[in-house]
Amino acid sequence: MAIILNDAGLHSHLLPLTFTRPVGQLRPGILRISEGWYVRSGLGVGYRTEGYLSEAFPLPSEKPHFEVNAGLFPTDALVAAVMDLQPGQVLIQEARALAFRMEDGEVPTRVDWTVPPAHLKPVPFAGEVIRYDRPWQLFRQAGRAIELDFALLTEGRRSQALSAYNTVIGDPNKIFLEEGAHVEASILNTLNGPIYLGKDAEVMEGCMIRGPFALGDHAQLKMGAKIYGPTTIGPECRVGGEVNNSVITGYSNKAHDGFLGNSVLGEWCNLGADTNNSNLKNTYGNVQLFSYADDAMVDSGLQFCGLIMGDHAKTGINTMLNTGTVVGVAANVFGAGFPPKLVPGFAWGGEQGFAVHEVDKALATARLVMERRKVPLTRHDEAILRHVFTLEQRRIG
């Protein structure tokens, strides 16, 4: 038995984050979506995704399969309901498919997720469903994801001891330190949610943290960082300054002063010193962002919405980013003034215009960046980035 996380027509809606990964590889809380399914179900997990991603993120070898919408958070109740499905059944809520247990050889089409096939027996699901169908849903629902993952990962376990040189506001039992995690002379506030520090994570002196908050394995908070939850920072990140309600997927740096709010960063990003994003319009109106799926600006429905940044993108020092800015994969943004609200992937420049960041140069930089964390740039990584470069060239003008 295995679980297939199916992009279910969401791939283009979650760009630029999904240019380099399937939907099931997103990290809304402490764990990636796929990791949450694996830990809660005990089953192998694979992906039904875009063709150019499928070699790096293959289907599982085990059969039979449960086919699940990858944009759903794996709550305990949802995982149990999926695993109870029998062949020929579809799990539904509000007439939309959540998961299938099809006969051998059958594969759900994109339409099947919105209009379940009539020949399948519907099984209603009345429990909580947390959906990620737009990038901003990751930070909007980060608090619930962190709380659920915290409960999963800490149940029946004892935290490493917390140093007495810290100040705790709220319930100290809502703070969990994995092996090797270290925090000193900081303020930890759990009144609004838990605080989780991964293996060998470090919180340097003078940090102020309000939960819900998660800091991944081997990640660092720099001295004096101010973190407003819900915020999740993935493994190997280096983060300083002020961060509010944001998701940093992993291996990315915002090491210096500057504000990041209501935002999502991919992996291997770097924000230069004093990079700041706006998350609120002067009119206090809804923020619009560019949607790759619609090839147009769309209304997020949010008053607070900041930056969405794809993998390997970077900003120079003192970069200013407007509300609802979308920065594509391997873009390099710098210079005075505000760049446009869409910075295409592999763009090089800023307010004055963009040149093409040649793919071979971008790959050379990626190798150097990844080597610093002792992670190789694989042939799969290179093939994916070259494919994204081909897709994005037309947007650079």
Image (spheres, rainbow, N blue to C red):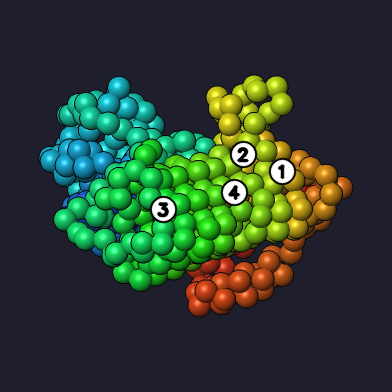
What's the residue type where badge 2 is placed?
Answer: Gly
The answer to the question of whether label 4 and label 3 lie on touching residues, with beta carbons closer than 8 A, is no
User: Which residue occupies 69% across, 47% down?
Assistant: 276
Q: Earlier in the sequence, mark 1 or mark 3?
A: 3
Distance of mark 2 from mark 3, alpha carbons? 31 Å
**Residue at the right extreme of this rendering:** 352
The answer to the question of whether label 2 and label 1 lie on touching residues, with beta carbons closer than 8 A, is yes
Label 3 sits on residue? 167
Q: Quadrant of residue 101?
A: top left
Horizontally, residue 249 falls left or right of residue 92, namely: right
Tell me the crowding category of disc 2: few under 14, some 14 to 19, or many 20 or more residues within 10 angstroms, Cα based. Answer: many
Tell me the crowding category of disc 4: few under 14, some 14 to 19, or many 20 or more residues within 10 angstroms, Cα based. Answer: some
What's the residue type where badge 4 is placed?
Answer: Glu
Q: Which mark is residue 163?
A: none
What's the residue type where badge 1 is placed?
Answer: Leu
Q: Which mark is residue 306?
A: 2
Q: The N terminus appears in which quarter of the rendering?
A: bottom left
Distance of mark 2 from mark 4, alpha carbons? 13 Å
Tell me the crowding category of disc 1: few under 14, some 14 to 19, or many 20 or more residues within 10 angstroms, Cα based. Answer: many
Q: Position of residue 382 (x, y in %)?
A: 57, 68
Count the numbered circles shown: 4
Q: Position of residue 210 (x, y in %)?
A: 45, 45
